[in-house]
Every structure is written in structure tokens, then in C-alpha cells.
Image (tube, coloured by chain):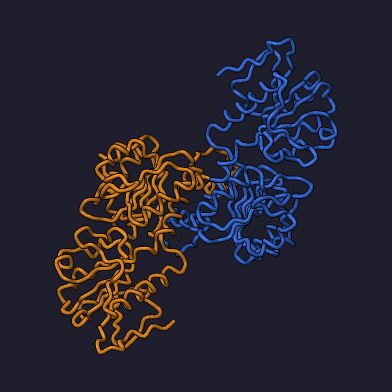
Chain colours: A orange, B blue
Amino acid sequence: MHVPVSADQGHDPVITILHSADRPKHLDGPNVRFVTDETLTAALPGTEILLVWDFMSTAVRDAFPAADSLRWVHTASAGVDRLTFPALLDSDVVLTNSRGVFDTPIAEYVTGLVIAMAKDLAGTLDAQAKGEWRHRESERVGGRTAVVVGSGPIGRATAAMLAAVGMRVELVGRRAGEGVHPIDELPGLLPRAEWLVLAAPLTDTTRGMLNATTLGLLPPRARVINVGRGALVVQDDLVAALRDGTVAGAALDVFEKEPLPADSPLWGLPGVIVSPHMSGDILGWRDELETLFVDNLTRYRAGEPLANVVDKTLGFVTGSAR
Amino acid sequence: MHVPVSADQGHDPVITILHSADRPKHLDGPNVRFVTDETLTAALPGTEILLVWDFMSTAVRDAFPAADSLRWVHTASAGVDRLTFPALLDSDVVLTNSRGVFDTPIAEYVTGLVIAMAKDLAGTLDAQAKGEWRHRESERVGGRTAVVVGSGPIGRATAAMLAAVGMRVELVGRRAGEGVHPIDELPGLLPRAEWLVLAAPLTDTTRGMLNATTLGLLPPRARVINVGRGALVVQDDLVAALRDGTVAGAALDVFEKEPLPADSPLWGLPGVIVSPHMSGDILGWRDELETLFVDNLTRYRAGEPLANVVDKTLGFVTGSAR
């Protein structure tokens, strides 16, 4: 697939692609600029469309004042928290995300983590490494209660899959909806959350939502899984809860700072699984992300409404926004 | 719960319980004999009911000639392969198993293994142990094909759960049935088996069913999961297939010899997960097994048909046998 990015019509927008080691394979054209964190500011003047391919980058905020022609920013991620800074929010620039690419992979990942932790797969692998036949009894998954926070496509897909393997699932979103508890009911649900899954966007409302207070509401032996954003959790509070046994375990795919610093106690805490922000990244995901952008670009150039437009007040794509 | 095992009616059958370190907690009475492998033969004369609580024991075969009053043998396992020796098969002794206790736990276990292997959880834990942030892309589970061999309750529960997480599942049994391929169709299914799950009883038909020939029919990068019996697989052939890359990985919970001998190459082969025959053993399983026996004992003493009667010709409980 080769996608020449140039207009047949008179207008040929300049597209700047912010990348790091990896870059899109099929996007090319005279008006396409490939840049990194260091060269972003110089490339922004004249740029009409910014593709944030390196969605871990925080460079857009600093470079933003140099944007004099920017109309559309697209990010190759579901979360947009690195892009919801005041200058962009206050501007007319349209922000779109990659909603839809990560749903099922993350649902699978979370389901696998729940079962692996219930069956103590880590203990099995540890015994195997030592050549030890160490029979243990393990936990059921069926009938246990999971509270899933985040009622977007990722949270919904995750809740559905956990229910499919027999769990009782309570889904929590910003607002009440069919099958969705509003976020203010969360404190009442936490005492039943044998498994707490965070799959919410990072917004002013959700930042630090799992802290000493809310951790204290969990039942004994609860486990926490975070596939949303690291800052949903007050990391020091979680570490304390793991150390004092308030929480039995955690599987964390996202962190306040990524990569997780080498001196973080999370690396070595018993009952904790640290994974490198990979829950949604299945083989072929970059092609899917690229296709999603190209589809939206086609709409842009045809003057059609864009898909996956982020509500900049809320910080995520609402409802069934296409 | 205390279950006094003595008859209110005139007849008070002698019950012998073959156990090892663990023994039933609630069974007791004047006519109950607790024995181990070493004392089984001495206890068999006069025994009417034998509860094989230590289902890993192979002592029954050797002690069997001492059984002069035996009418019923119950095993605290789903598989009965250690009890289907000629002298018992040719006798009038009724054999029952613990069908039903292990279904959902094993289905969960297999589903967890599939997702954990697809997402390379072992690689994540290995990186974590080294403090390394090692992002990788992983595999989808949805849409992949799993062939599940074994159409009893364990195989069916497993197939249903794998389908529930989005896999295409082909279920293979002894005979064709609704949604079940007969075993002679297996060679035609293997080339599509990205995941091959063995959950069949060990019989003359199934012994060694996965061997160099059948392994050779699997597609590249296939993975094998065995939660049935070790001897379903020609272990040396599997080791060879893993070494030469014919098979990408295996998760084995059962082995030709258990515990798996320390010098087995399986312990250290890349892509292999060795677990200690624990897939069905959830917390509380021993209570469930005990309840199941006590329920059957109640039927026995009331002169009612027993539940879970093994067809001694086939080597397992057939159809919807209660």
C-alpha cells in the first residue's frame, strides 16, 4: 500500500508527522514532513494537519505556539491526555484519536491477567524455573465481582469479556447509562470489587481516583488492574496498600512515568505484574492505526466530518461518535 | 459438617478410603478404614466401598486380588485411567468418578493459558524480574482457531469459554454429535489448529494420539495445551517438535510421569509452561469432591442408581449420565 498524500483538488495541506524510532510506512508525499520531538517546533509553521504518531511524546505542548495554520491534530492512541493542554483546548484545532483499535486486544489482555493471577501463573513459572513441582490450589474466576471503570469502547469490551468468562461485572462511567453506574456510585461499589479494572481516560475527574481513601474501600484480597493511564492511580498510595496487604495484588500496564523508573518499588513487589504499556498493542496494530488516519484524512479532504473527534471539554470521544 | 458413615438400616457397608497426606475431613464412622498405598491390601478384605481419595495412586491394581466383597469404587478425579485395569473391568464392581467438579475451573485455566501465551506474559514476567521495560507486540486471541479434543464436560466447558472470548473452536469427541467432530476427523482439523487443547480421557483410543505424525499436521506456530492426561502425548515426540520449531509452544499440566522428573527437558524448553497437575484444583475443591462422594453414598445406601457411573468399556462416563 502506498498512500500519496497530495490533493487532486487545489488545496494540498501540509501534514507533519511526529514520530520517534518507528514511523508510518505508507504515508508519503511532497507536503508530508517527518519530525521528531526536536524538530517539531521548526516544522509547525505552515502545518495544517499534525499526526502524533509517537503518542508518548509530550512535545506538542511546548511546540504549540509555533502552530500558525494548524486545523487538525490526530493521535495514534486512545488516550488524549498529553494533548489536552489549555492552548490546544482553547483553540479551534480539531482533535481526533484512535478509538476502536485497542478495544478487543485490551479486553483480551485484562481477561488473561485476571485468570493468570487467579491461577497464580507467576508462581507456576517461578516454580518451573527452579525445577520444582509445587502443587497449589488456585482461585475460581467465575462468580467473582469485577468493577470496571471506564465506559468507553475499551471499558465496555473489557467488561463484556470478563462477563463472558463468568464474572459478575459492574461497569462505571462518567454518567449513568444503560448498564453503567455513574462515577459517584463508585465508592459504594468498591467494597464488592474483588477485581478493580481501570480503563478510564485521564481527565481532571479521574486523575488520582485510586488513592489511599478509595483503596481503603476495597475488600480484603482485592486486586487492581490498570490499563488506562498511570495517573489514574496515586502510585505511592498503591505501593503502600500493596505493602500493608490492603490490596493483594496489581497488574499495571501504565505508570505515572513511562518507562517505569528503575528505582520504582513496583518492579519487585510481591503480587505485582509490571508490563510495558503493551496491553493494546497486537501485531499489526500500527497498520490499523495508519489505516484509521488515512480514512480520516480522506474525510478531511472531502470536507466530510471527521471520525473520532474528541470532546475537548471532556477529554475523550463521546457516545457513539464515529 | 460431620458425616457419620453408618447405616440406619441393617446393612452397614465397610468403606475404605485410600489417601496420602491429605484425607477427607468429614467422613467418619466405625466402618470407615483410612489406608495408604502400603496398607490398602490388608484393608481390602471385607471392604464393600473403596473411595480412591488419592487419585494419583496406582496401588489399587496391585491390591485388587485381595478384594473379596468390593461392590463400588469411587475416584476423586475425572480421569479413571489408573483404575481401568483388566481385573476391575472384568469384575462386577461399579466404578464412579468426580465428573462435574473440574469443568469450569479447567475451562478457566485453559482460557487463561491461551491468553497468557498469546500476550507473552512469561516474557513480561521475565523482563520484570530483570527490571527491564521491554515493549513487544503481542497476538490477538479473537478469531484464532482452537481445536479442543474431548467432548466430556471438561472439553465442552473449555470449548465454550474459548468461544466466549472470541475464538473459533472445533470440538472433537469419540463420536460425531451436535457440534462435535468424530475423532477420525481430527487429522483434517489439525492443519487449522493454531491452538490444540487436549482434554480427553486416557483410553486405548486416545493414548499417544499426539505423536510425531499428528504433530506434523499442525500449522506453523501452533501451540499445544494438555490438561487431560500425560499419556495422550508421546512426550519425546513433543519435545522434538518443540526443539525443531514444528510447534511454537506448549502448556502442559499433565505428564507421562508425575511429578515430572527433574531431568525432563520440558522444564527448560523455551515456549513451554510446566504446571503441576493443578488446572482443576481450585480452593474448596476437596470439599466439593467429598460432597459428591457423600451424595453418591446416600444413593448407594438407599438402593438408588449411582451418579457418574463410568462405562468400563469406554473408560469414561457417557452422555449425560447423572
User: Looking at the rendering, in which quadrant would you find the N terminus of chain B?
Assistant: top right
Q: Quadrant of residue B277?
A: top right
Please state the horizontal and vertical placement of residue B69, each as a whole percent of the image: 81, 21
Figure check: A44 above or below A195: below
Please state the horizontal and vertical placement of residue B249, each as a whole percent of the image: 60, 59
Residue A5 or A207: which is nearer the viewer? A5
Whether residue B269 is visible, yes or no, is no
User: Looking at the rendering, in which quadrant would you find the C terminus of chain B?
Assistant: top right
Q: Is residue B79 left or right of residue A27?
A: right
Taking the spot 80% from the left edge, 18% from the top edge, the residue there is B46
Residue B304 or B231: which is nearer the viewer? B304
Figure check: B193 above or below B251: below
Figure check: B167 above or below A237: below
Please state the horizontal and vertical placement of residue B260, each as a whole percent of the image: 66, 46
Taking the spot 24% from the left edge, 51% from the top edge, the residue there is A207
Residue A290 or A21: which is nearer the viewer? A290
- How many discs mark residues in the rendered view? 0
Q: Is residue B265 left or right of residue A86?
A: right
Whether residue B56 is visible, yes or no, is yes
Please state the horizontal and vertical placement of residue A69, each as a whole percent of the image: 18, 79
Taking the spot 69% from the left edge, 33% from the top edge, the residue there is B308
Q: Quadrant of residue A136?
A: top right
Taking the spot 21% from the left edge, 75% from the top edge, the residue there is A71
